[in-house]
Image (cartoon, grey):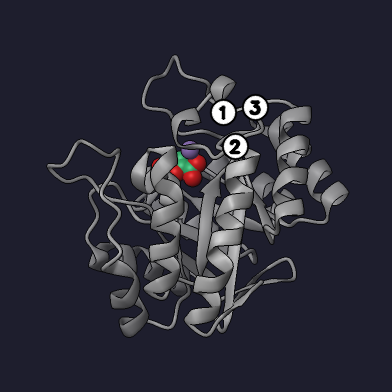
Amino acid sequence: VVKIGKVPIGGRAFTVIAGPCAVETRDQTRNTAEAVKAAGAAALRAGAYKPRTSPYGFQGHGREGLAILKEVSEETGLPFVTEVMDTADVDAVAQAADAIQIGARNMQNFALLRAVGQTNKPVLLKRGLSAKIEELLLAAEYLLAAGNEQVILCERGIRTFETATRNTLDLNAVPYIKQKTHLPVLVDPSHGTGIRDLVIPMSLAAAACGADGLLVEVHEDPAVALSDGAQSLYPQGFRNLMNSLRPVVEAVGRQMA
Ligand code: PEP
Ligand code: MN
């Protein structure tokens, strides 16, 4: 069991971490955090440093974003996870955040893995866009070898020949990894599908196949989101997700954190 703040990931718990793709404004972050908290999320997610395909896309607010997250986290009582992309920012992110995310694009950034491995914060390591499970586990091994044993893995979909969805969510990975390792495994149905209407069904499937929780994107108004609006749930959609999840989580013998 790895703890983000006081929130357990693993064991009997099923833990939902929710929030916007990115910190856009203080109000957007606060409103979204309050909405996900009211619906039963245990922790907050949002990026201050955003890995964007285009250099002209919104890159995140960096340090200012971290400060907003810290403020909103204190106001709501939700611990938060946020991504670090550069070794130069590891100390700042480790100081502000309750858990450090290493994103898909950096799963095999070995210098970053070593630097984050030297912090004392939990790490949420996402599977690379085209990474085999073995490569994900060896990336996790870099963190463990550097001394950080608080590692949470995250299946977020992989590239396949299928283009109907943004990625192909590889739910095989969940029970496979849980048989091969002791590490908790989250599923990200938002990046895993890229399509809002698929987020609830794939979340239920994730709970059914043994995931330890979800990392899910929610925006107060996805229509105006600066990134990943098409896959972000509306607050009402997130409430529906939580209501649909509870019976599935109970059916597999787990408890909502
Ligand atoms: C994210 O979680 O905001 C993100 C960028 O995800 P990924 O690294 O899985 O693409
Ligand atoms: Mn995103």
In the structure shown, which secondary structural element does the residue marked by tag 2 occupy? loop
Figure disc tally: 3
Question: Amino acid type of disc 2?
Answer: Tyr
Picture layout, residue 135 above or below residue 241: below
Question: Amino acid type of disc 3?
Answer: His
* The C terminus, quarter of image: bottom right
In the picture, measured across the screen, residue 50 lies left or right of residue 19, that is left
The local crowd at label 1, few if under 14, some if 14 to 19, many if 20 or more residues have their Cα within 10 Å, is: many
Query: Which is more N-terminal, label 2 or label 1?
Result: 1
Instruction: Quickly name the residue at label 1.
Output: 222
Which residue is at a point 63% across and 27% down the rendered structure image?
A: 221
The one of 182 and 191 positioned closer to us in this rendering: 191
The one of 10 and 234 positioned closer to us in this rendering: 234
Q: Quadrant of residue 185?
A: bottom left
Q: Are marks 1 and 2 in contact (CB under 8 Å)?
A: yes
Q: Report x, y in % for residue 94.
A: 66, 53
Q: Residue furthest top?
A: 56
Q: Report x, y in % for residue 220.
A: 66, 32
Query: Which is more N-terminal, label 3 or label 1?
Result: 3
Q: Report x, y in % for residue 210.
A: 41, 76
Instruction: Quickly name the residue at label 2.
Output: 234
Picture layout, residue 245 above or below residue 233: below
Which residue is at a point 52% across and 85% down the rendered structure image?
A: 253
